[in-house]
Image (spheres, grey):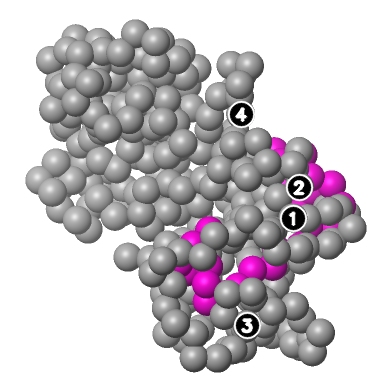
């Protein structure tokens, strides 16, 4: 079955590619033995298909880059290697950062920027830092009573939206947030409306306090407010564990997920912490389809524990 899907994907069959994506996300062990054949078929997109590539496939990919003969495919090859979980892939990305292969000068960014697309980066001391966790849990959006004392958005005066209220005393939350280093209560509060136009940061503490960061900058293209609007009264509640950390969906109802890796609608967008200028850790995704019958897009939740900041940004097609 998978070999047939690969043949169809090589012919740009969208349905076959979508099915391969589903397998890579939910049942990656089924696809791993066929990744060499996928590379033979020159299927280089999406890069996420190659997450579980072993040393044999990664070695071939690295040789393709080092040969300088596939410069037109360099963007996709960098993405694939960045997504591979094999140690050889990380070593290659580090080497290419200081010894750029042929064709790198034609790209818009340096090699290690591609690592952000896969959810990792390097700390200032050169050590690897994973921005995403491995454990992932479904998020069900449940109606919660609105609070009359809810703070309001300084930009549009609408009541702020509580996207999630997390406690690491819950084992699932602790597992999902393990990579962030956060312990205690973590409140995600933002403007449901203005977050569609700008990343909104809050300052947070482990007792659950969340305060709008004064440094948030109003974008020039923020629509003129006609008055306050009520945000959704649905709040994320943690449910069962997902079988892998790659099953969040920004498109489908039921895709909201705590932990794991996000499904980006556009390029990866890990906010930079206002306190230290380092990428923030990803916490979860809330899909518009889970918030409203006609909802679209997705809200992405992030935290940076050392500086005490959260961020919520939004993407749509």
Mark 2–mark 4 distance (CA, rounded to whole Å) = 18 Å
Residue under label 1: 203
How crowded pointer 2 is (Cα within 10 Å; few <14, some 14-19, many 20+) is rated as: some
Q: Residue 122 is drawn in which quadrant?
A: top right
Q: Are marks 1 and 2 in contact (CB under 8 Å)?
A: yes
Q: Secondary structure at mark 4?
A: strand
Mark 1 or mark 2, earlier in chain: 1
The dot on residue 308 is 2
The dot on residue 157 is 3
**2 left or right, relative to 197:** left
Q: Secondary structure at mark 1?
A: strand
Residue under label 4: 129
Number of marks present in the image shown: 4
Mark 1–mark 2 distance (CA, rounded to whole Å) = 6 Å
Please provide percent x and percent y for residue 236.
Answer: 67, 70
Quadrant in the picture for the C terminus? bottom left
How crowded pointer 1 is (Cα within 10 Å; few <14, some 14-19, many 20+) is rated as: many
Magenta stretch containing residue 182, yes or no? yes
- The span picked out in magenta is 170-199
Mark 3–mark 4 distance (CA, rounded to whole Å) = 37 Å
**Position above or below: 246 against 210:** above
Mark 3 or mark 2, earlier in chain: 3
Mark in the foreground, 2 or 4: 2
């Amino acid at each position: 079955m998978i070999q047939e899907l690969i043949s169809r994907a090589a012919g740009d069959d969208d349905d076959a590619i979508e099915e391969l994506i589903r397998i890579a996300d939910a049942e990656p062990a089924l696809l791993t033995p066929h990744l060499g054949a996928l590379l033979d078929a020159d299927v280089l997109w999406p890069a996420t298909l190659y997450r579980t590539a072993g040393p044999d496939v990664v070695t071939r990919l690295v040789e393709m880059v080092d040969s300088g003969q596939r410069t037109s495919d360099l963007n996709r090859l960098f993405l694939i290697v960045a997504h591979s979980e094999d140690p050889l892939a990380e070593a290659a990305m580090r080497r290419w950062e200081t010894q750029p292969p042929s064709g790198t000068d034609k790209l818009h960014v340096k090699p290690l920027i591609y690592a952000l697309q896969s959810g990792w980066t390097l700390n200032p001391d050169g050590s690897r830092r994973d921005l995403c966790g491995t454990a992932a849990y479904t998020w069900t959006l449940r109606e919660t009573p609105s609070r009359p004392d809810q703070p309001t958005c300084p930009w549009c005066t609408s009541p702020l939206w509580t996207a999630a209220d997390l406690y690491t005393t819950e084992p699932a939350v602790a597992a999902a947030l393990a990579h962030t280093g956060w312990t205690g209560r973590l409140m995600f509060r933002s403007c449901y409306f203005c977050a569609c136009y700008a990343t909104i940061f809050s300052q947070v503490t482990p007792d659950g306090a969340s305060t709008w960061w004064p440094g948030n900058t109003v974008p020039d293209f923020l629509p003129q407010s006609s008055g306050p609007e009520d945000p959704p009264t649905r709040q994320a509640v943690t449910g069962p564990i997902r079988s892998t950390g790659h099953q969040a969906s920004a498109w489908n109802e039921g895709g909201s997920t705590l932990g794991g890796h996000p499904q980006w609608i556009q390029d990866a967008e890990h906010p930079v912490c206002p306190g230290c200028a380092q990428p923030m850790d990803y916490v979860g995704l809330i899909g518009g389809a889970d918030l409203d019958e006609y909802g679209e897009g997705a809200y992405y939740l992030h935290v940076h524990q050392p500086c005490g900041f959260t961020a919520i940004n939004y993407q749509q097609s």
